[in-house]
Image: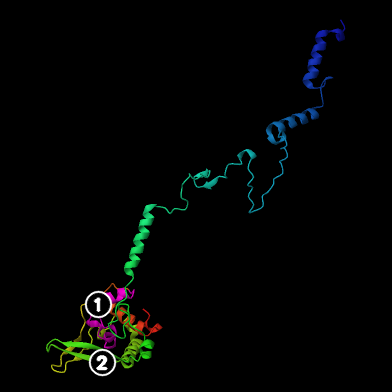
Amino acid sequence: MDPNNNPTDTNDRINLDLSMGIGPQAKDPVEQDGKFMELLRSVTDPTQNAQPSPALPPIHTIPPGYYNLTYPQNAAGLLPPITNQGGARALETPRPGTRLGRPPGGHHARRNSSKAAVTVEKNVDKDIVPPYPWATTRPARIHNLRYLYFNNINVIFGQVHCKPCESTQTVEYNLSEKFGELYRYIYDNKEVLRQRAPKVWSCPKLTSCCSCKNGMKPVIGENKEEINWLFLLLGQMLGCCTLDQLRYFCDKTSQHRTGAKDRVLYITYFGLCKQLEPCDLFNL
């Protein structure tokens, strides 16, 4: 038999050609390898299969300071929401009869305001009859030097009392002379005082009695409205006042009235000098 007509040999040759890649259906090995590597790269590289992103719509930027307040037509009766820390909430329509602008606390706020008004009325001092020509209608207040010189008030007088002799005398001070002495003393020693009354003010030098030569203290009545403040200032005898009387002066002149007596006495001296001559030297 012709070997070309042997079906078994023909099948064997076809299988051999296919296994070696040389048969009529075999393709170029280089081309096969190229397609295989391309397929391998497409599997391992996800970017090869990624679809191009669709084009984004144009962005309309809002200029700074502009707010789009356009609302749907079916929501014309709604108010825009208010943003707070807890989120957005709609404005509430006030109930009929509600008073707008009422301060917090209701009747408590009105009660506090009435208390404040009462406190202010208590702090306002009423006018008094001036006990001396150099005193004003306000307690613990004296006229200034200009007023005193204009009204020819140049001599300040007051009474002193001697306890051993039980005698009372009247002492007079020249206004310009005695205030000049006090002015010079404060001018020279203000930095040294350190807002405390010196010993010469705390333990003042008293006028000697004509009979027994003892010191005579100034007469200070129980009525604080009748204290002769200018006489005590010029004689530098404010230290004879009690702490309560000095605090009364500070209270009526809106001065700091707490602390030791030397501190309150210092404030009283400077407060009276400031009333008499309002200059920077007597600023506290």
Q: Residue lying farthest bottom? A: 210
Residue ID for mark 2: 172
Which of 62 and 111 lies nearest the eye of the viewer? 111
Q: Quadrant of residue 1?
A: top right
Q: Position of residue 151 (x, y in %)?
A: 36, 90
Residue 118's spot in the image, x, y percent?
A: 33, 63
Taking the view exactly as shown, the residue that stands out farthest to the front is 129
Task: Answer yes or no: is residue 230 visible.
Answer: yes
Q: As displayed, is residue 268 above or below residue 44? A: below
Is residue 19 inside the magenta stretch?
no
Q: Would residue 45 be seen by someone viewing this image from the given angle? A: no
Query: Could you say which is closer to the camera, residue 17 or residue 164?
Result: 164
Tell me the kind of residue under disc 1: Lys
Judging from the image, what secondary structure is the residue with disc 2 in? Answer: strand
Q: Position of residue 48 (x, y in %)?
A: 72, 35
As for residue 246 lying within the magenta part, the answer is yes
Indicate left or right for 191 with 5 as reference.
left
Residue 224 disc label: 1
Q: Position of residue 143 (x, y in %)?
A: 35, 84
Instruction: Judge whether 79 appears above or below 281 on screen.
Output: above
Q: Quadrant of residue 138?
A: bottom left
SS category of the residue bearing label 1: helix
Mark 2: amino acid: Glu
- Residue at (86%, 8%) from the top-left corner? 5
* Dot 1 or dot 2, earlier in sequence: 2
Q: Is residue 75 left or right of residue 185?
A: right
Start-end of magenta stretch: 226-255
Q: Which mark is residue 22?
A: none
